[in-house]
Image (cartoon, rainbow, N blue to C red):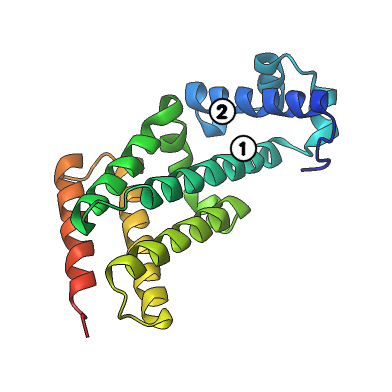
Amino acid sequence: MRKRPQQQRAKLVVDSILEATLICISEMGLDQVTTPKISEKSGVSVGSIYQYFENKDQIILELLRRKSENLGLSLKALAMNQEEMDLKTLVDVSLQFGFDVMREDNGFFFEVLKHWHGYNNSEAAKVLEKHFFEVGLYVFNRFYRHWDFETLKHKSFVIINSTLFTMMRFVSNNDFLISEQQLKRELSAMILSYLDSDKS
């Protein structure tokens, strides 16, 4: 962002800009979004938008950062509030959570994931990776207490990245000959098998 809002009124203006951007992306697709369209949808003048953001891309990056932060915190809450669940159930619930989130906001994430190569090194991607990595460490340490930190770190990295990449590919490409239900079963089996492949 060009300027972080400090006062409550300014924060509300930025929130309006970001909410309008989300709606524009969901309704017309990422490539069709322009600053004037965001202005029209939000009721905030183009000049006022440029006080906080240099261009459309900067608005989208801030929106993604916030959405990623909220997604990561929600996943943490899910994982840490389910201490009575066995590992398989927790994996299945987490996968369902992921697919549900991708459907939210009238397909916002579906549209963004089609262009994820452009955001792969963004702050939003780093925020997601950090939260997911911390969730992985927490969950796997709970069920595999005998693993040292290096093992936990490596297992978390492989599982999180392979699962996220597969889910992203699935939701951004409708040509795969596999249903969502079957994909969730396959991902669950893959994760559990990989975790159990090294119990030493």
Residue beneath the point at 73% across and 29% down: 14
Number of numbered discs visible in the structure rendering: 2
Earlier along the polypeptide chain: callout 1 or callout 2?
2
Residue denoted by label 1: 63
Element marked by disc 2: helix
* Left or right position of 72 against 177: right
Distance of mark 1 from mark 2, alpha carbons?
A: 8 Å
* Left or right position of 4 against 148: right
Residue beneath the point at 23% across and 71% down: 195
Where residue 174 sits in the image (x, y, percent)?
A: 27, 39
Q: Is residue 129 above or below residue 171?
A: below
Badge 1: how crowded within 10 Å, few (<14), some, or many (20+)?
some
Residue beneath the point at 50% across and 46% down: 73
At label 1, the amino acid type is Leu
Farthest front residue in view: 84
* Left or right position of 123 against 1: left
User: Front-most of 55 and 166?
Assistant: 166
Quarter of the figure with residue 141: bottom left
Q: Quadrant of the N terminus?
A: top right
User: Front-most of 102 and 117?
Assistant: 102
| Residue 173 appears in view | no
Where residue 113 sits in the image (x, y, percent)?
A: 44, 43
* Left or right position of 181 against 10: left
Tell whether label 2 touches label 1 (CB within 8 Å): yes
User: Front-most of 48 and 93?
Assistant: 93
Mark identifier at residue 22:
2
Residue beneath the point at 21% across and 80% down: 198
Badge 2: how crowded within 10 Å, few (<14), some, or many (20+)?
many
Where residue 33 sits in the image (x, y, percent)?
A: 60, 28
Q: Is residue 200 above or below residue 109?
A: below
Quarter of the figure with residue 45: top right
